[in-house]
Amino acid sequence: MPKKKSNFNRLTWVITELIIGLAGFVYGLYGTISSLPEILTTYIILLSMGGILLIVAIVQLIPILKKREKKYCAKCGEKIKKNDEFCSKCGEKVEE
């Protein structure tokens, strides 16, 4: 019996990380600016963890977005690999 493929792919995970990181960063920043000195440490930790999560999510998002850029043949519309000089279907020279 084949495994069922999940719709919850890597991009979804990275966007979820981005949202949680942004929420933690903003809430930690707000709490750091407006809090009492007794609980300041909690907000600083939340601010730091949110910032780290944001950086990690952005670093993971860059290659995903670059990978999604695809080239197509101007003549026949076939997908072309990044380093190909000619279309594999019709033989047309690929323009940059």
Image: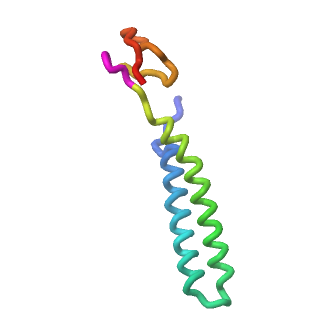
Image location (x, y in percent) of residue 1: 53, 29
Camera-nearest residue between 45 and 29: 29
In this picture the colour scheme is rainbow
The answer to if 44 sits in the magenta stretch is no
Is residue 28 positioned above or below 68 on the image? below
Residue 95 sits in quarter:
top left
Identify the residue at horizontal 57%, vertical 53% (top origin).
57
Residue 55 sits in quarter:
bottom right
User: Magenta span: helix, strand or loop, mainly?
Assistant: loop
Identify the residue at horizontal 41%, vertical 27% (top origin).
71
Camera-nearest residue between 60 and 82: 82
Identify the residue at horizontal 66%, vertical 79% (top origin).
42
Q: Residue placed farthest to the front in the image?
A: 96
- Looking at the rendered structure, the number of numbered marks drawn on it comes to 0
Q: Residue placed farthest to the top in the image?
A: 91
Image location (x, y in percent) of residue 19: 49, 61
Image location (x, y in percent) of residue 49: 64, 66
Q: Which residues are magenta?
A: 72-77
Image location (x, y in percent) of residue 96: 42, 24
Is residue 86 positioned above or below 54 on the image? above
Is 43 left or right of 6, judged from the image as shown?
Answer: right
Identify the residue at horizontal 61%, vertical 90% (top origin).
36
The answer to if 76 sits in the magenta stretch is yes
